[in-house]
Image: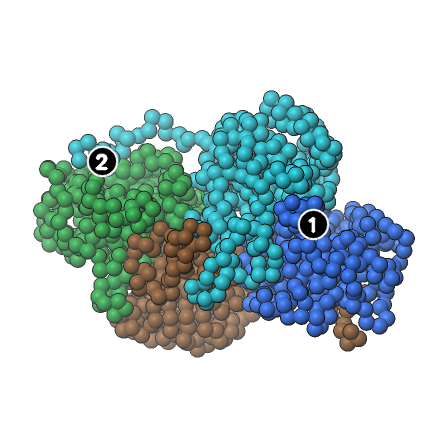
Chain colours: A cyan, B blue, C brown, D green
């Protein structure tokens, strides 16, 4: 008992911190990339070509990320395909990987047909229910009247059955889908981690709860007073977030909700290069060569192009 | 019809415009249901918006990726995940709301909280019972053709959701899908009702050359109308299974001038549907 | 085939509705009360003495509601106790019914000790997980590392176990908690059902999804243009809501988030009367006698009192 | 000490003020954890706010019913569900976030996303292992005394959560709770770790007359300090089980003038803690 420190016995004035400031969670993009590269499973933000955490993905690839398991949103394009281009993905939980009106995802399709990638034949329900279970620390989620009529139970070995103890009926069980880290694009955040996503269908909160670590990239860093104007606009509460990275136009070439348009020209360039076997050349030029995020932005058109995309009329 | 056509239609309207118009008509009076649909489904999105401003003032226009309900636009977004779907929206539809509502199914909610009446669920294969395949072709996992993943086709199981494709060929319309990733009427007859708690399957199938529904007993695909410029023979020769054909099959009523005017000035000012790529017989 | 109507064959101009207006969901408080009274199970809004759907509860009691099963929020006070005072409750899913700093819930305690009320010995986890399962049309939710160390499995017969098909371990299963109707207090709604709750811990969305019908009472009815200024502030989407009732100060005597304070004077009157066996007298005076909501508001102090409560400094 | 006291304390401070101060001290340096607590727990709420503005700038102050994090107030709300907890908050904590975070438990999240370090979980009974009972006393369901329901005490299972009561008597502090609705160290020793995946039990028990912790091996309640105005004998005679007492038990360091000044001007301008009803020996 003598050796234990009882803080309640020490007046507050004797315990004042050396620095009364709140601790900032702001780190550099490159540091975030190095952290992500140490992880083995990743959850990412956005839906389709919207709000992709592209800066963080590029930084992680630069930092040598490999052998990753990816739990993407229920649908995604380049935010999944680029990992595959770089050979950094070992396993993919698949619901949809494609470029919508621009066609199939070239690296995904190639890797899938070459069987160089383990694919879990998932779907929207599987991703969402599994993520929700993990978000709540629960081992699985159940569902009925859905998989009974499809081929998923035959193809997805992670989908099992369980007997409902209330009805006695057999229902399907989706396992908790935890990740080591969630990487999320938002439009605004403060340095303490309070983050606002201004659009989309909000798959991010459960993705973050299901992850052991959360890293946010924000188009803009705002004051906490700005955040506190309306707490309901904070879609990721500060205490959930471990690190914040300032990455203006960090979702490029995808849309950033209510901020800037997707860069169709760049996406077409990516697709054309990858469809012609030049994915390494793309990566060398746009992922590995730029020494930082600003250089990347210059490379894809600089301020002129970014302002064009901000008009949201550029496509 | 001579071989492959990439942007079918007439001088007066594109086939994408015709499809938006006729699907809007089919939503007339829809109430508390939701139009909208899949990522790439701008034609059902246009149809939903067109229906909402004309024949279905109570329709809740929902767009998936943008997560919005009743967004206001007169220039068609590039997809249902385009954040411009979200402008001036009244409320949000989060992905978990989609999942929860779809699993509950229409039966338990009296039509409330449900998915699209026409949701634009296509597939790389569609069969005579309206089942769809987004997984691929070949011996899983060694697929010869890898599909993009099954995404929302799983929700075909939740309630009556029409089939919809932008391509009509024997490659797509097959006797039996290689992998049933989206459940239509399953194996026909009462097979779907048995597996899915009595929930109905697709009411219609919309394609660039025709409209089909499903027969009352077997729930097999039946040709209902053929779009202008095509014949019953065109449909039959581009379909890999035997369609039910009962008597004379009428021509699909073409878009009226008024319909096209509303569509082009209040839904698709940018003319995105004029150049939409669709294929027949590819 | 001849008898079936194919709407796609009829031009839009031939199908225009007689009335192009959107249909209003606005009904009177008394009509809402009659609808609720036809139901058997109810979910209610608010937490503790915050955002209680009190107008709807009073209207339902006036309309003769009885034999109800109540699934309250994880904690509640008068919004549960008043049903019991009126003898309208058959079964209660209990997590917490009490008046916080004002003490025990008198009618709940009396009925519990007299055993005139069936009580399911639930808790926060049970209510939330059961409601979430019902919201998603799923038969149950599982949980581990929680009930293992408590008495709940012995006392709550609706809590069962199931074997996790992934780990082989036995985990607890909480059944889906569906209701016939959810009655919800909000600060603002439009006539199409888009509803905003300005505070609280947002148990309402799942409560509504878990219900066969949703009735909202709103302090104020606002235009849809006002709603559309920020769709993220709509906490209950219009398509979820069946009916809207205009009930200014409808949460009285509980708090309405960011709008008006709880009426401590009135709550103390309620408690004093009920603790002295005069609950019928209270009901006669404040629930059954007033001919409408305005008369109720006059009875509890009228505009002067309501303005006092709006200052949020009245307690 | 002579019999029952309803608002214990001294002329200089009330016992509620002392408790707020000493619990704030115990939160010094807390980082990424959350203060706040149960509905009626305004003392832990005051303690959390006091800690945040003095010794724990990184503490996330969470209030349950209002669903807020880092609300700003200098006048203490009437409960953690008072919407005034929500003013100028930075973000929201919805009930499902509480549930999800608590079930995940601290072990898996390195302290993130977790519940209160001091959460104000009381109970109508507390036993020597820190288990709590909010269900009642008597033969369930025919209870002689019906408790209000177990509410958040279930979350004692999720991680280290201190006990806290505003009443100290033999009626409350009992050898063994009639119903264990909140899990402390269960039956002592390693019983809790075995049942709850290695998660620690309560570190402290805070009462109006003393502070206890739990022994390292058996995890039995141990007297740590006695508040000014009370003696070890007062504690012993009002406790229904044998407390571990090791050597001299010190007096709880009373609030300093500075602490009281900060509390009264920046946390509790309304003086709510001055008149807080607490009881000893009732």
The answer to whether residue A253 is left or right of residue A43 is right
Q: Is residue A303 above or below residue B162?
A: above
Image quarter where the C terminus of chain A lies is top right
Decide: few, some or many residues near mark 1? Use Cα within 10 Å; few <14, some 14-19, many ≥20: some
Q: Is residue B7 visible?
A: yes
- Tell me the number on the disc at residue B137: 1
The answer to whether residue D15 is left or right of residue C134 is left
Same-chain check, marks 2 and 1: no
Q: Quadrant of residue C109?
A: bottom left
The image shows residue A64 at horizontal and vertical percentages of 55, 27
The image shows residue A18 at horizontal and vertical percentages of 33, 26
Q: Which residue is mark 2?
A: A6
Q: Quadrant of residue B21?
A: bottom right
Residue at position x 40%, y 30% in the image:
A21
Protein chain holding label 1: B
The image shows residue B198 at horizontal and vertical percentages of 59, 69
Residue at position x 49%, y 69% in the image:
C180
The answer to which of A303 and B118 lies nearer the viewer is B118
Q: Nearer the viewer, mark 2 or mark 1?
A: 1
Q: Is residue D274 visible?
A: no
Q: Is residue B146 above or below residue A245?
A: below
Residue at position x 45%, y 39% in the image:
A212
The image shows residue A238 at horizontal and vertical percentages of 46, 39
């Amino acid at each position: 008992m003598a050796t234990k420190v009882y803080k309640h016995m020490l007046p507050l004035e004797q315990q004042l911190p050396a620095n009364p400031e709140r601790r900032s969670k702001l780190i550099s993009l490159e540091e975030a990339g190095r952290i992500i590269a140490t992880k083995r499973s990743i959850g990412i933000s956005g839906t389709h070509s919207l709000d992709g955490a592209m800066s963080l993905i590029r930084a992680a690839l630069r930092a040598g990320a490999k052998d990753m398991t990816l739990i993407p949103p229920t649908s995604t394009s380049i935010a999944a395909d680029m990992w595959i281009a770089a050979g950094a993905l070992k396993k993919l939980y698949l619901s949809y990987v494609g470029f919508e009106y621009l066609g199939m995802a070239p690296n995904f399709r190639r890797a899938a047909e070459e069987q160089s990638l383990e694919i879990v034949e998932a779907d929207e329900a599987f991703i969402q229910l599994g993520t929700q279970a993990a978000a709540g620390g629960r081992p699985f989620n159940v569902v009925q009247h859905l998989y009974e009529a499809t081929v998923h139970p035959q193809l997805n070995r992670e989908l099992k059955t369980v007997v409902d103890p209330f009805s006695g009926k057999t229902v399907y069980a989706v396992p908790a889908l935890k990740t080591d880290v969630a990487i999320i694009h938002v439009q605004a955040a403060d340095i303490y981690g309070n983050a606002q996503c201004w659009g989309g269908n909000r798959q991010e909160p459960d993705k973050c709860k299901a992850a052991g670590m959360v890293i946010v990239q924000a188009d803009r860093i705002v004051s906490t007073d700005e955040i506190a104007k309306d707490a309901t606009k904070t879609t990721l509460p500060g205490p959930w977030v471990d690190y914040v990275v300032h990455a203006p136009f960090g979702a490029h070439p995808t849309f950033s909700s209510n901020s800037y348009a997707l860069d169709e020209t760049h996406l077409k360039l990516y697709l054309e290069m990858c469809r012609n076997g030049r994915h390494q050349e793309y990566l060398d030029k746009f992922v590995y060569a730029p020494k930082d995020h600003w250089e990347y932005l210059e490379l894809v058109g600089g301020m002129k192009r970014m302002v064009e995309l901000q008009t949201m009329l550029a496509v | 019809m001579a071989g492959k056509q990439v942007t079918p239609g007439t001088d007066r309207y594109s086939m994408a415009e015709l499809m938006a118009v006729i699907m809007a008509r089919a939503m007339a009076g829809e109430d508390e249901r939701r139009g909208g649909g899949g990522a790439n489904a701008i034609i059902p999105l246009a149809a939903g918006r067109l229906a909402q401003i004309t024949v279905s003032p109570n329709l809740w226009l929902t767009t998936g990726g943008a997560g919005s309900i009743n967004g206001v636009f007169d220039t068609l977004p590039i997809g249902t995940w385009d954040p411009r779907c979200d402008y001036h929206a009244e409320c949000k539809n989060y992905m978990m709301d989609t999942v929860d509502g779809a699993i509950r199914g229409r039966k338990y909610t009296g039509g409330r909280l449900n998915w699209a009446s026409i949701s634009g669920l296509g597939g790389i294969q569609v069969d005579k019972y309206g089942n769809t395949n987004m997984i691929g072709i070949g011996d899983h996992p060694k697929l010869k053709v890898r599909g993009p993943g099954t995404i929302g086709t799983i929700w075909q199981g939740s309630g009556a959701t029409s089939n919809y494709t932008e391509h009509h060929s024997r490659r797509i319309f097959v006797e039996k899908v290689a992998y049933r990733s989206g459940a239509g009427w399953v194996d026909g007859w009462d097979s779907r009702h048995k597996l899915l708690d009595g929930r109905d399957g697709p009411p219609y199938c919309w394609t660039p050359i025709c409209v089909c529904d499903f027969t009352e007993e077997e729930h097999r695909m039946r040709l209902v109308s053929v779009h202008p410029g095509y014949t019953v023979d065109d449909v039959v020769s581009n379909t890999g299974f035997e369609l039910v054909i009962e008597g004379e099959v009428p021509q699909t009523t073409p878009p009226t001038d008024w319909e096209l005017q509303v569509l082009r000035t209040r839904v698709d000012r940018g003319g995105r549907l004029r150049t939409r790529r669709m294929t027949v017989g590819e």
